[in-house]
Each structure stands twice: as C-alpha cells, then as structure tokens.
Image: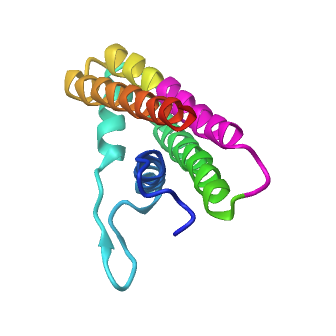
Amino acid sequence: MNKINNSNLTPYLALFWLVFWLFNGLDKFLYQTDMGVLTWYGKDRGWQFLTYITNMKLSVDLVGPILWFAGIWEVVVSLFFAAFLWSQVSNQNQSKNRNLRIYDIALKISLLTFTGFCAFDIVVGDRAELLEHSTYIGVVGVSYLISHVEKIMSNS
C-alpha cells in the first residue's frame, strides 16, 4: 500500500465505500449466520421487507428476490471501489485521471443506488431509512468533492 500517496484521502474514502457496500451486500445473505469464529448478526431485512411488502399488498414471495437483488447489487458496487483501489496499488499504466474516473463512476453508481433506496423509502413510508439514505447521499457528495479538490491541488 505504500504506492498510495498518504496525503490524499481519496483511496481511504474508496476503502470505506468498498467495505460499506461489501458488508451491506453480504448482510443480505449472512444475517444471523454462524461462521464458526463469529456469528454475523446484521439487520433483519427479511422482517423489515416483509412488513413493507405486506403493507403494499404484494406477494410475500417477493421478499427473497428483492433482498437477493439488493445484496448482489451492493456487492457489485463494492467491486467498482475495489477496482479503483487495485488500479492505485498496482499502478497500471494509466493516468491518474483515468483511475479517478473509476472512482467517479463508483460514486455515481452509489448516488443512483441511494436515490433508488430513497424512492423506495418514500413509497413504503419509512422516514428513518429515508433520513439514513439521504445522509449517505451527502457523504457521497463530500467524497466526490474531496477527490476533485485533491485532483485540482495535484495539478497546481
């Protein structure tokens, strides 16, 4: 990891988002799973989504596929941040700006994901989740701004 410039926050933010999306995605599959060394407790999204689906008078058979889709989507989002970090560590023959484009794409996918979550939160009337997801939209925005300020500073 010594190839990562310690003065930049962007790789550390990318690591945060990688772990955030990976663990949130895995939580959809590993809820209350005994893994020997530890038990993954997480949040009972099954009960939460069962309530949403029941209130919307939809088939409860949708809960599993919705959670699987969300979990897979979140793991895929984490892979974009992993690709950015890999490009930083391996220092492939790409410009820093091209590597930053991977990070920008990952942040934009995160923004779209949180926007979708917010829309769902509004439809199901979960204001606590809406506040949480809206806050993360702000954190994505700050992550984007930091990376671009660092880019401007490195070019001057």
Q: Position of residue 121 (x, y in %)?
A: 33, 21
Residue 95 quadrant: top right
State left or right for residue 91 relative to residue 155: right
Q: Position of residue 6 (x, y in %)?
A: 43, 58
- Above or below, 72 against 113 in this view is below
Q: How are the residues colored?
A: rainbow
- Residue at 67 percent of width and 55 percent of height: 87
Label the magenta part by its dominant secondary structure. Answer: helix
Q: Which residues are magenta?
A: 92-113
- Residue at 31 percent of width and 74 percent of height: 39
- Residue at 71 percent of width and 38 percent of height: 98
Is residue 71 among what the camera can see? yes
**As drawn, which residue projects farthest toward the front?**
156
> Residue 148: within the magenta?
no
Q: How many marks?
A: 0
Q: Position of residue 156 (x, y in %)?
A: 53, 31
- Residue at 39 percent of width and 28 percent of height: 53
Q: Out of 47 and 25, give the one closest to the viewer.
A: 25
> Residue 110: within the magenta?
yes
Q: Out of 82 and 33, give the one closest to the viewer.
A: 82
State left or right for residue 15 relative to residue 99: left
Is residue 1 among what the camera can see? no
